[in-house]
Each structure stands twice: as C-alpha cells, then as structure tokens.
Amino acid sequence: MADQLVVEHLTKIYERGDILALDDISFSVVKGEFLVVIGLSGSGKSTLLRCINRLIEPTQGKVYFDGVDVTAASGGELRRLRRKMGMIYQQFNLVKRSSVLTNVLAGRLGYVNPWMSAVHRFPREDIEMGLKNLERVGISDQAYTRADNLSGGQQQRVGIARALMQEPELLMADEPVSALDPATSHSVMKYLEQMNQEDGVTVITSLHFLSLARRYGTRILALKDGKIVFEGLPSEIDEARFKEIYGEEAEHVEVR
C-alpha cells in the first residue's frame, strides 16, 4: 500500500530562543493507519503536527501528502490540501460565545463562499450535515447551546464534529484528551477510532499517556528532544523502552 503521508528530514528551529524543536524527523504513514506520537511535554509533538499542515512553517525538510509537496504549496493549492487535513486541538479552539452548530459549521469554511461564512450563512445541506455529525458524537441536543456552556468532554466532541465537516482524509489530533478525565478520554478516543475504522480516515494523534497509545494506536512514534527515539508496534514498548523515552519522568507518567 502506498504511503499517504511522507515526512522527510523535517527540522524546526524557533528563532526566538534558538530552540531546536524538531531535529531531522523522517517517517511515513500508510492510509488507514492510527499513528500515535508520544513523548514528554516539549518533545516536539505539537510542532510536528502543525508543521505537517503548515500551521507552523518548517525550517527545513519536506512533507508530501498524496504525492503533493505540502511545503511548496501556496494559495489555493495549500487551502485544498488543508481541506483534506482535519485538526483537533488540545484546548478545543471553539468560539465560546457562538452556538455549538455554528462552531461545527466552521469546518466547512474551506468549501463555502467566504462572504457567506463571515455572516454565518451556510447552505441547507451543510446545516443538515452539521446536525448529523453532532448526532454522531452524541450531542445533537446541544446544537443551539453556547459552546462555553458545555463540559470539556462535550467541547472536544464539538471539535471532532467540526473536523468531520471537512470530510478529511487525514485527521490530526494534538493532545485531544490532556484536559479530560480518564473516562471522558476514552469516550473521545473511541470517536477517533470510529472515524479511523468506519470512515477509513488516517489518524495521527499526540498523546501523553502510554496506556491510551497502546489501546488505540496501530503504530507508535516516540519523540524525545525533537528526535525520533522509537518507531514500532505498541506491544514493542516494554518498561525499559518506556524509561528510555521518558527518562527520569517515567515514574510520573501513567504506564498501565
């Protein structure tokens, strides 16, 4: 099976502070994979995801999506590529004063007339699609509620429904459950798993807890100080490898 995503020698240096966030990262992802990126805070997980869709500009290296060089794309081509790449954020990134449905419809911004979207006018079929996606994540009854009236777990489900509106081929989730309790975390991860298994969407998610990585990932990539220190199956991470990835912090990170 051909690689859907190819990352070659990706490097990111934050000039303020001269921080090397990513150090010559190379890997590929096959369509339909559920890749989990693990590592301590500051290891480069978020930077990696944001460099893939160029929310952050890489310093060096190439990213290819479906054979197209994302790092060379601009204007309309970059917008078309980003339509295929859904993104779910750690802090939800919702417009808190707007309704749940309006937040979900923001996932169609790459498809509708910019003027119409600016005044929150969307085609009827998009509204119906938004309601269906809210039903899919179990919160259709909250469609007209203000986003800031929802719990953290419900807000993250809004984020998932918004990503579904893009009809993405690749879904990237940046620490999507770090602000949630364990039970709610599994509930959110199961929706990502459902998109992966039922819709065939490739998923790349960064996680802190190894237990979630083992439960949901088909493959694990571990970062430490901006470098790949492990790439393989979840079952291949034993206690020794886990300590190698997390160092002295291993005792403070959930392993089960």
Image (tube, rainbow, N blue to C red):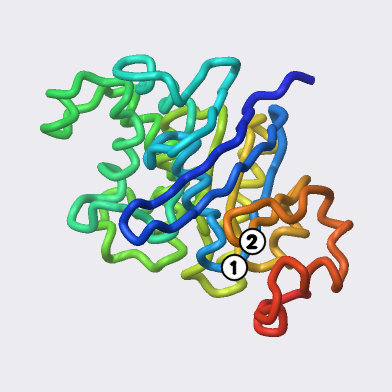
Identified at 47% across, 45% down, the residue is: 12
| Disc 2 crowd, CA 10 A, few/some/many (<14, 14-19, 20+) | many
Residue nearest the viewer, comparing 160 with 73: 73
Q: Height in image: 98 above or below 162?
A: below
Identified at 28% across, 57% down, the residue is: 147
- In the image, which disc is placed on residue 240? none
Tell me residue 174's x, y (percent).
50, 53
What kind of residue is marked 1? Leu
Quarter the N terminus occupies: top right
Tell me residue 119's x, y (percent).
11, 32
Looking at marks 2 and 1 on the same chain, the residue that comes earlier in the sequence is marked by 1
What kind of residue is marked 2? Lys
Residue ID for mark 2: 224
| Disc 1 crowd, CA 10 A, few/some/many (<14, 14-19, 20+) | many
Quarter the C terminus occupies: bottom right
Identified at 61% across, 39% down, the residue is: 195
Does 225 sit left or right of 124 as displayed? right
Residue ID for mark 1: 40
Tell me residue 5's x, y (percent).
62, 28
Which element type, helix, strand or loop, lies under badge 1?
loop
Tell me residue 163's x, y (percent).
44, 39
